[in-house]
Image (cartoon, rainbow, N blue to C red):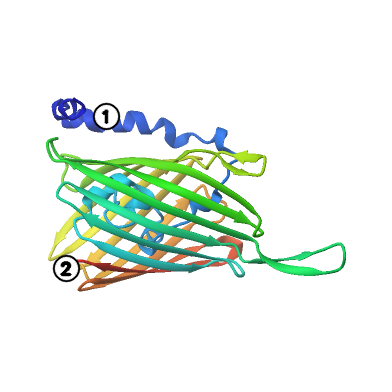
Amino acid sequence: MFLSFLRKIKRTSIVSVMVFVCLPFAVYSEDYAETGGRFLLQTAGARVLAIGEAYTAVADDIYALYYNPGGLAKVKRGELNAQYRKGLVDTYYGFLGITVPTEHSTLGASFFTFQGGEIEINELDGTSETLKAEEDYVVSLGIGYYLDSVPGKLGFGVAVKVISSKLVEEYEAYALAMDIGGYYDTAVKGLSIGFVFQNIGTKINYLEHADPLHFTSRLGIAYKLDMGMQNHLWTSLDIISEDKVNVGMEFAIKQVVFFRAGYKHGYDLESFTCGVGFSVGMLRIDYALGLMGTLGENHLISITFRDS
């Protein structure tokens, strides 16, 4: 019955509904001032970082699973991606993801980890020991489905996340969460709209202290200008909860070399981003640089293998 209803909706109605539903959430933040699982806000993907994380309406590769599972429906080739990012002092982040396309949908799975370095604990008896300060893991499974019966291209997706966190090798916490997202390629060639609600789930509970996960909503719009000769120019904008706005662009030359730039407004440290990418055969390598104010620079490299 739901699919029959969607088939009857006009193209303009779909766009209006998306905007009406998502925009109020894009400025919602007060109730989530004290939240847990802040590691869920970490960037995944050098390409995404390079365009300022203005990715909700772009979402067309493995990182759709992380940012907008509805965009998984756009992924028509199998992808395997790995990344590593050195954080402050001895912290680091890691990501491993895979997509498997089917006829009308695409499945995705990923593994994300944050390692918070080591901490020295001094005991009252004068002894000390070195422990891992924090270990966080997130396993995600998602699907993006393309509704070919609806005028234009309309996709929806959901990702389910199992979250594990441990502090000083002793205090453990677990949580379950899900992301719900979608995209719509409008009647205007190259213009797309996307939305996502992230981290809808249980509280993360250390001993008797429980905090809600950090809910995030995103509303995005993107325009892809096809310049011919396998060249294109992406421009994108995301409105994000907590009064954040991301903008970005990507210029592709022959689908081999990619130049990217972005800006993140409303963040404590992050601002300008940029990066480059190279795609040869089944291999794509992306590099991104993000400015972190007084904390210096954020460097990220991603490697993606794709079906031919």
Task: From the image, tell me which residue sits under label 1.
Answer: 16
Q: Is residue 55 visible?
A: no
x, y percent for residue 99: 27, 57
**As rendered, which of 48 and 273 lies closer to the eye?**
48
Rendering coords of residue 22 (x, y %): 37, 33
Q: Residue under label 2, please give it.
A: 308
Query: Could you say where residue 59 lies in the image, as x and y percent from the top left?
Result: 30, 51
The image quarter containing residue 294 is bottom right
**Nearer to us in this view, 75 or 13:** 75
Q: Residues within 10 Å of mark 2 (few under 14, many from 20)?
A: few
Viewer-closest of 208 and 178: 208
Tell me the quadrant of the picture where the C terminus can be found: bottom left
| Residue furthest right as drawn | 125
Residue 149 x/y as whole percent: 12, 36
In the shown orientation, is residue 72 left or right of residue 115?
Answer: left
- Amino acid type at image mark 2: Ser
Tell which of 102 and 228 is nearer to you: 102
Comes first in the chain, label 1 or label 2: 1
Residue 85, disc: none
Name which residue lies at 66% across and 44% down: 207
Residue 202 appears in view: yes
